[in-house]
Amino acid sequence: MSHPRVVYLQPEAPPKPALGAPCNGCGLCCLSEPCPLGVVVSRRRTGACAALRWDAAASRYHCGVLADARQPLWRWLVRRWIAAGVGCDAELESAPLGRPKALSAPLGGSDTRSDERGGRSDSEAAQQPATGARDEQQ
């Protein structure tokens, strides 16, 4: 049985499409693990793909290897290797995370101490992404 993992997405990222639906650039698949080409580029088999890029103007993620491919043959190969145009094949569930307790209170104070239960302080929690985070399970 796999355990839930937290993958932080940009708040403006589109929601994950249904399995088989066209890719909308949500980034969940590439942020959870690299594809075979991403393994080569990232030099890792787990975690987010190092080639994944956020495009703020388009509010979506893009494959950096594909974006940088200039030669038609190389572009065709990359599209094939990352399964571009095949449709969403990420069998992942996504759900927004709840707001951390440290952020539930107004952030007006300058308290930098941790609470007695070992939680994060207000200033530490403010530095962590709270919106746009989604929890996914395999």
Image (cartoon, rainbow, N blue to C red):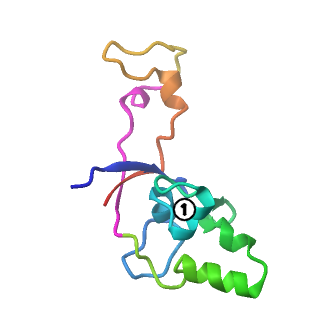
State yes or no: residue 95 in magenta: yes
Above or below for 110 versus 79: above
Q: Residues within 10 Å of mark 1 (few under 14, many from 20)?
A: some
Q: Residue at x 62, y 61 (%)?
A: 41
* Residue named by callout 1: 39
Q: Secondary structure at mark 1?
A: helix
Q: Residue at x 71, y 81 (%)?
A: 74
Coordinates of residue 56 in the picture (x, y in percent)? 67, 59
Q: Name the outermost residue toward the right.
A: 70
6 relative to 108 in the view: left or right: left
Coordinates of residue 7 in the picture (x, y in percent)? 44, 51
The magenta segment is 91-107
The foreground one among 10 and 107 is 10
Q: Residue at x 48, y 52 (%)?
A: 47
57 relative to 133 in the view: left or right: right
98 relative to 41 in the view: left or right: left
Coordinates of residue 131 in the picture (x, y in percent)? 48, 46
Q: Quadrant of the N terminus?
A: bottom left
Within the image, what quadrant is residue 78 found in?
bottom right
Within the image, what quadrant is residue 62 found in?
bottom right
The foreground one among 93 and 40 is 40
Would residue 34 be seen by someone viewing this image from the given angle?
yes
Would residue 52 be seen by someone viewing this image from the given angle?
no
The foreground one among 76 and 56 is 76
Q: Quadrant of the C terminus?
A: bottom left
Q: Name the outermost residue toward the left.
A: 1
Coordinates of residue 68 in the picture (x, y in percent)? 74, 70
